[in-house]
Amino acid sequence: MAITTIVMDVYKPGSELKNKVVDISDSFNARVGDDQVRLVIKYVERGIVERMEQEQLTPFMMGWVGQPDEEQKVTAETGIAVSYHGSSEDIIGGGKVQMDLPGNMFPQEGAFYGFFGLENSDGKRVTTNNVFFRVENDNPDMYVDTLPFRTELQKLLDWATAKSKTTFGGISDAWETLKKEIEDALASGNTNIDTYLIRLKSAEERLEQYEKDLAAGKAVSQADLDSTLADFKSNIQSGLDEINDFNESIKNLSVTDVDGGIPDYMMDTLNSAQAGIDKSKFNLIFATDYHYDIGTNYNPDNIDVPDATIREVWESGLRKVLNATSLSNADAIVFNGDNIDQPMVKDVPLEKKMMLKELHDFLLTATSSAEMPAFILKGNHDGNYNHKVAERNLTSVITDKEWSQVYNKVAPDYGEKRNDGANYFYKDFDNKKVRLIGLDTYDLPETTNDDGSMKYNRFNTSGLQQAQLNWLANTALQVPEGTTVVISMHHPIDGTLATDPDATKVINHDVLMQIINDFVAGKSNSVSGKVSDVPVNIEYTFNGAGTIAALLSGHFHTDGNVVKNGINFIQTRCSLGAGDNIIGDKRIKEYIGTPLEDAFDIVTIDTTAKTIDLKRVGAGSEDARYATRHFNY
């Protein structure tokens, strides 16, 4: 069996090697059952590789291999730290990562698709590359390297341990102590190992000379040995000091080298946004419609740009998450739906697997990189529903249970209140007297038609069921006196920022609107829905008028606002570089690779002045109409 080609993404804006097919048959061949198969991953961004070393990240590979309908899930977790292998001539600052894969990665002939990733010492994982290759049997050109890979650090430790076993006075005891200090320090962070090799080179040469002198019968004075041991300690301590300084600088960071990390051209914008956040007020990062998608060149508007640019637009969704989560002065962040998008593989089972992978990576990236509570809501694109209604059944869509399983596995508990693990929630920020509520506007029965297709296609139908609406009225909106409420949802309430004449496409939105109006008015009521297949009957009492700063939404890829019954309904355009319904093609043709390529808002609520301000980061900040939006409530 031989792996003949592999596609490794180079996460560098504008790189010509992006998605390049690289022939690595000289470095990656295997037969079924072979162990410790050497894989050298080429053209890896140097910054990523250095981060691997610094944080002691462990590489892993996961995917599926085989013929259609006979695929096997395979996983390789090497448990061995990666090493930087120098610069590649093919890309400035590039490098290589080496892994040893077990034989269970190659159980059968067929196509392999999956991903390469990293795991830190706390078990947090993040993927960095997409991997595709062909597995073939009976390849006569076989080469299997079964020697395990040893890192440069391990080589250093082995060398030093060997030196400690010589007859040189107190070096053995001193080294054992120093070795323990080094290992403890490196467990939480590591600088470039080349630094150690350079600093210890002098001590190594002197020790080797002493060995030659002893072998030749020459005497070595204790003064010389003491001097060498002092230099040895000094060089090691210098390295330890550098490690400790490095650890202090990264101790609050998570694994964030997604897609190469935050690009340099975003840093001034993000630093300015971070500095401008008034921490005495409540601040919410509101980000919507990323549409992260793996390896697609989908160009619905036939914009005249290269396929590589289109792919970058979709794939950069994961990287742009880091822009929003970097603003740690905020109190919370909401990713408001349409976080991921449907892959264009024309294979329904594969499509779902890839979407679950996208969902996992989006959730993991958002929650592991955020230094504040991070919440992710559903949009109409997040569940693998689409226009092809007949193809959508319970095995092809991402069900509520599957969504919940991925969410619960990845996202931490921020102390929010949920209804039996549902995607809707509320979270109190007592010190700011604010309650943040997130709603699931694609909460519809997972029932099927006679032909097995989904009765409610969440791609083009928004709705809320009895359980969520009852929870909203009788739990989430039962707030302590003096609390200001802000509500986030993907689809705006029907009749506010958009109106659908077909009530079967916006199910129970009228009930939702009635609950909101009654909360603000402080009224009791009994309300019922109009769609018999999604029945709602709710009774509730609000004692005293409630306060809502705004209802925030996305979905339509545009900025807008309207006031209904004294309530602010505010909409924000998409983070996605395509489909901008305000500036259209300009978003792709001019903004990609600039500080305007992203778009999200810093929402600031002043509960004393009763104002809400939205400051745009990215597209819209260049336009006075959207750069800052101010509302009273």
Image (spheres, helix red, strand yellow):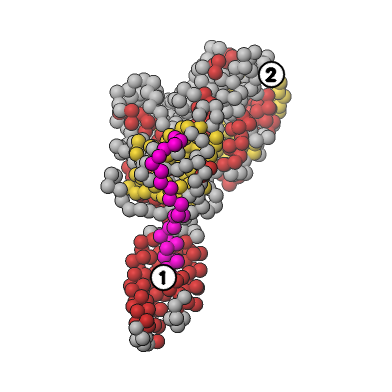
Q: Where is residue 220 in the image (x, y as percent from the top left)?
A: 37, 86
Give the prevailing secondary structure in the magenta stretch: loop
Q: Which of marks 1 and 2 is in front?
A: 1
The answer to whether 252 is drawn above or below residue 110 in the figure is: below
Crowding near pointer 1: few (<14 within 10 Å), some, many (20+)?
A: many
Depth order, front residue of 183/435: 183
Depth order, front residue of 574/191: 191
Q: Where is residue 178 in the image (x, y as percent from the top left)?
A: 47, 71
- Which label belongs to residue 236? 1
Q: Where is residue 284 in the image (x, y as percent from the top left)?
A: 50, 39
**74 sits to left or right of 14:** right
Q: Magenta stretch: give its range.
A: 136-160
Which amino acid does the dot numbered 2 rest on?
A: Pro
**627 sits to left or right of 56:** left
Q: Is mark 2 on a helix, strand or loop?
A: loop
Q: Is residue 38 magenta?
A: no
Residue occupying image coordinates x 41% and y 31% = 295
Crowding near pointer 2: few (<14 within 10 Å), some, many (20+)?
A: some
Which amino acid does the dot numbered 1 rest on?
A: Ile
Residue occupying image coordinates x 34% and y 83% = 216
Check disc 2 and report the residue beneath it: 535
The answer to whether 7 is drawn above or below residue 398 in the figure is: below
Answer with mark 1 or mark 2, whichever residue precedes in sequence: 1
The answer to whether 185 is drawn above or below residue 300 in the figure is: below
Depth order, front residue of 276/233: 233
